[in-house]
Amino acid sequence: MQRLRASIDNIDAALIHLLAERFKCTQRVGELKAREGMPPADPAREEVQVARLRELADAAGLDPTFAEKFLNFVIAEVIHHHEAIARD
């Protein structure tokens, strides 16, 4: 049990670091969008990302619906950040 929990803890730490890197990239995207007068949301890009992530999840043996919910949560947070950048 202890070894499994240690593995879970390591995976959780990796997930957090990956999310931080993702948000650094989306921060730069938000800055570019604001500079170019583009809207914070990009529904076409989001649709492509959701479809891609669902396929990846299915191939990895992860529930695609769960993966979509997770990505939608991340996308909503990114849009929130992009809106804040555009206001500044």
Image: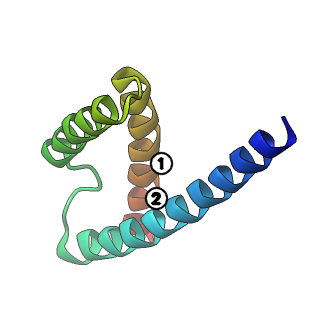
Q: Residues within 10 Å of mark 1 (few under 14, many from 20)?
A: few
Residue at mark 2 to residue at mark 1: CA–CA distance: 6 Å
- Is 4 or 41 nearer to us in this picture? 4
Q: Residues within 10 Å of mark 2 (few under 14, many from 20)?
A: some
Q: Based on the displayed image, in which of its 4 quarters is residue 50 positioned?
A: top left
Give the residue displayed 41% in from the left and 70% down from the top.
Answer: 27
Q: Position of residue 49 (x, y in %)?
A: 23, 44
- Is 21 or 7 nearer to us in this picture? 7
Coloured how? rainbow
Give the residue displayed 40% in from the left and 23% down from the top.
Answer: 63
Residue under label 2, please give it: 81
Q: Based on the displayed image, in which of its 4 quarters is residue 57 positioned?
A: top left
Type of residue at label 1? Glu
Image quarter (top left, top right, bottom left or bottom right) of the C terminus: bottom left
Give the residue displayed 38% in from the left and 51% down from the top.
Answer: 79
- Circles 2 and 1: CB atoms closer than 8 Å: yes
Q: Kindly state the secondary structure of the residue where label 1 is placed.
A: helix
Q: Position of residue 82 (x, y in %)?
A: 39, 60
Left or right placement of residue 2 versus residue 74 in this view: right
Residue under label 1, please give it: 77
Type of residue at label 2? His
